[in-house]
Amino acid sequence: MTAPVPVILDVDTGVDDACALLLAAMHPAVDLRAVTCVGGNASVDDVVGNTLKVLDTAGRGDVRVARGAASPLLEPVSHALHVHGDDGMADLGWPASSRRPDPRHAVELLRDLLGQAASGGPSDLITLVPLAPLTNIALLLRTYPAASAGLREIVFMGGAAHAGNATASAEFNVWHDPEAAAIVLEAAGELSIPVVMYGLDVFYDVVITRAQAFELMAVGGRGPAEPAGRLIDFQCGRFGTPHATIGDAGAVCAVIDRAGLSTTRLPVRVELAGAYSRGRTIVDRRDWSGDIAHDPHGVSPTSVEVALSLDAGRYADLWLRTVSCPPPLMVGRP
Ligand code: RIB
Ligand code: CA
């Protein structure tokens, strides 16, 4: 069995961030080192509180949580409570955690953990999984570029090669802070950080049925199954659908089981100026081997692995099997 992959999540918990946190916290192939929080779906303070609750539910009170940016670099705050509920996490009434976040800002915690990873061997390098607006990540890469030496890769949920969701053009995480997304892509190119873009082209494909949610809810006990089922049931009820996506959790599935994801390496830019297209990820699918020298923009300097399809049943089963288990024994954890 290969060693668990060191992972840090950056979240705006969020119903589907909660689905991702449960998977990352409980799957044996993931060594969840920390979770950093940013304003997005909800206020950063609600995100911190929601994240601590979810980690408690998964039996992972050992995982550090840090508070990060409350608002985007330039854009005003624009939460998505109409999607995620008033508390940002389906208003399920989960008990508040007794834990406090790490005293460091998210960017400082990321700097410290990536610095430690850089001083170890290749197996210590960290997979950074942003599932939210990229404000913390942009601040990190511009403030502490040397920290990138501790990164194996960035697998981020965001963007889209085709249609948006926050607007006709833009996916919510990129739309919420377009400057941050542009900075992360530019810095990743400059710092040679491998990037996987898990965007809307696959985001909605991995679904759990309401019947499966009811089965999870029937498991009972104090483990994550019942809350996990309620997260799916909330979405089905909110949208009047017989199933709901695990959303961000699909990006964690891709970290655990990359063979289930199909990507193509493509140049990507972020539109910052368009009245109706601001925050759009412009994925260049043209054949650059031909003569398009007349394009005044040229090719984007940053190419990333863009997820264009996946094995949805494989990832749905991975998530279901993991959250159906009792919390991991805390034996041996610090
Ligand atoms: O567009 C979907 C993304 O926006 C997800 O990360 C969801 O949690 C919201 O943050
Ligand atoms: Ca999210």
Image (tube, rainbow, N blue to C red):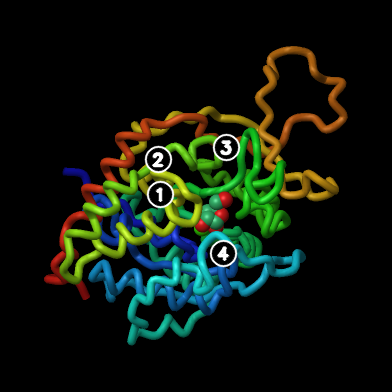
Cβ of mark 4 under 8 Å from ligand 1: the answer is: yes
Q: Give SS at disc 1.
A: loop
The residue identified by callout 3 is 304
Marks 4 and 1, the one that precedes in the sequence: 4
Query: Within 10 angstroms of label 1, few (less than 14), some, or many (20 or more) residues?
Result: many
Query: Does the CB distance between marks 2 and 1 fall below 8 Å?
Result: yes
Query: Does the CB distance between marks 2 and 3 fall below 8 Å?
Result: no
Q: Give SS at disc 3.
A: strand
Q: How far apart are marks 4 and 3 (CA)?
A: 25 Å
In which quadrant of this rendering is ligand 1 seen?
bottom right
Write the residue at 27% across / 70% down. 57
Q: How far apart are marks 2 and 3 (CA)?
A: 22 Å
Marks 4 and 3, the one that precedes in the sequence: 4
Q: How far apart are marks 3 and 1 (CA)?
A: 23 Å
Write the residue at 85% across / 48% down. 275
Q: Give SS at disc 4.
A: loop
The residue type indicated by label 4 comes to: Asn
Marks 2 and 3, the one that precedes in the sequence: 2
Q: Residue 255, located in which quarter of the rendered image?
A: top left
Q: Which one is in front in this view, the residue at disc 3 or the one at disc 1?
A: 1
Q: Viewed as shown, does residue 226 lie left or right of 168?
A: left
The residue identified by callout 2 is 206
The residue type indicated by label 2 comes to: Val
The spot of residue 231 in percent (x, y) is 38, 60
Q: Give SS at disc 2.
A: loop
